[in-house]
Image: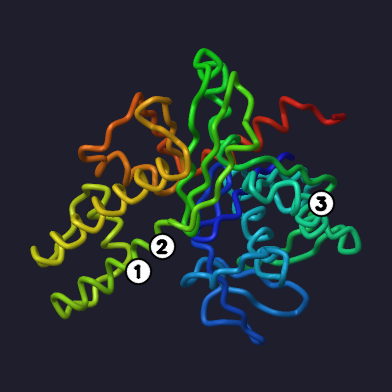
Amino acid sequence: MIIGIDHGYGMMKTANTVFTTGLTEYEKEPYTMQNVVKFNGRYYVCGSGRQTLIRDKTSDDSYYILTLAAIAKEMLHRNAGTKANVRLAAGLPLTSFGRDKDKFIKYLKRTTFQPVRFEFEGQEYKITIDDVRVYPQGYSAIADYIDRLKKEPSVIICDIGSWTVDVMRIDNGVPNADTCRSLELGIIRMIDKTLEEVRRSTGLSITAAQVEQILKNQSCSMDEKAKNIIIAQGKDYVNRIFRTLIESGFDVAAVPIVFVGGGALFIKQNIGNNRVCAMSIVEDIKANAIGYERITRALGANQ
């Protein structure tokens, strides 16, 4: 079974599931078994709160536990039972791909743990991770677009994640490694700034979920002044992204751009007067995970 996982700083994504990259550890059984992984005698509630930023995702067991939860959730969605041989397909930013690939593969595979035995929501799982493939994120998200993009001599891919915005240019269908940039402009930073601005100006303590709802132009009951602050902060954020892209050498008025990732919809709703040559938006935040699976199938089991 091939399972693609996008290990985001804000959200964990598989081809069919999404949950918050949060983890709370308990020594004893917690108040609920929903979204709970039991591993090595300890309990972990997955999807609760927001994970502290870990620049090196292999520095502790957090992302490994979250990976087990993602595998279980995807198997549940596929009605695939609780025992399987799995080929994991994951991703890294191009800026750190060469440096971190081998370490990330070793971290996820953990040969000494095979098969992996754990519980998810009280159900026992026995998983053998046969192989781990790691691909460039962002580029993988547009796997469905590759043939179409080859018709353009150059295209900019902009993956707006929770903590970073990863950008690259594709020339004649091939990523140009010299153009890869990882910019610290993720949507969590913008949301935190917005929450503080609303609190300072109105005294209200709104939630990140409310901010996202407003920025996606969806219905949300809220004080009008707070709503206007959110809208203004969203436009400022999008303007900042476009300014930073240009400062980093990406002329979006001259080269077509494709936005992917969780922040892509914010661009769509708040583009304002920013000039673009041509713009496409991949709206499915699971696109990287889906792309990892598609590429793995295309490469075949023996590659």
The residue indicated by pointer 2 is 188
Looking at the rendered structure, which numbered label has been put on residue 192? 1
Residue 61, given in percent of the width and then of the height, sits at 71, 70
Q: Amino acid at mark 3?
A: Asp
**Residue at the spot x=91%, y=63% of the render?**
112
Q: In terms of secondary structure, where does tag 1 sit?
A: helix
Q: Nearer the viewer, residue 156 or 258?
A: 156
Residue 240, given in percent of the width and then of the height, sits at 33, 51
Circles 2 and 1, Cβ within 8 Å, touching? The answer is yes
Looking at the rendered structure, which numbered label has been put on residue 210? none
Mark 3 Cα-neighbour bin, 10 Å: few <14, some 14–19, many ≥20: few
Relative to 32, 109 lies left or right: right
Above or below — where is 262 with respect to 233? above
Distance Cα–Cα, label 3 vs label 1: 33 Å
Q: Nearer the viewer, residue 112 or 192?
A: 192
Mark 2 Cα-neighbour bin, 10 Å: few <14, some 14–19, many ≥20: some
Relative to 204, 35 lies left or right: right
By what rule are the colours in the image chosen?
rainbow
As drawn, the residue found furthest toward the top would be 151
Disc 3 or 2, which lies upstream in sequence? 3
Q: Amino acid at mark 1?
A: Asp
Distance Cα–Cα, label 2 vs label 1: 6 Å
Split into 4 quadrants, where in the image is the N terminus?
A: top right
**Residue at the spot x=72%, y=53% of the render?**
82
Q: In terms of secondary structure, where does tag 2 sit?
A: helix
Residue 269, given in percent of the width and then of the height, sits at 25, 42
Q: Amino acid at mark 2?
A: Ile
Q: Quadrant of residue 150?
A: top right
Mark 1 Cα-neighbour bin, 10 Å: few <14, some 14–19, many ≥20: few
The residue indicated by pointer 3 is 102
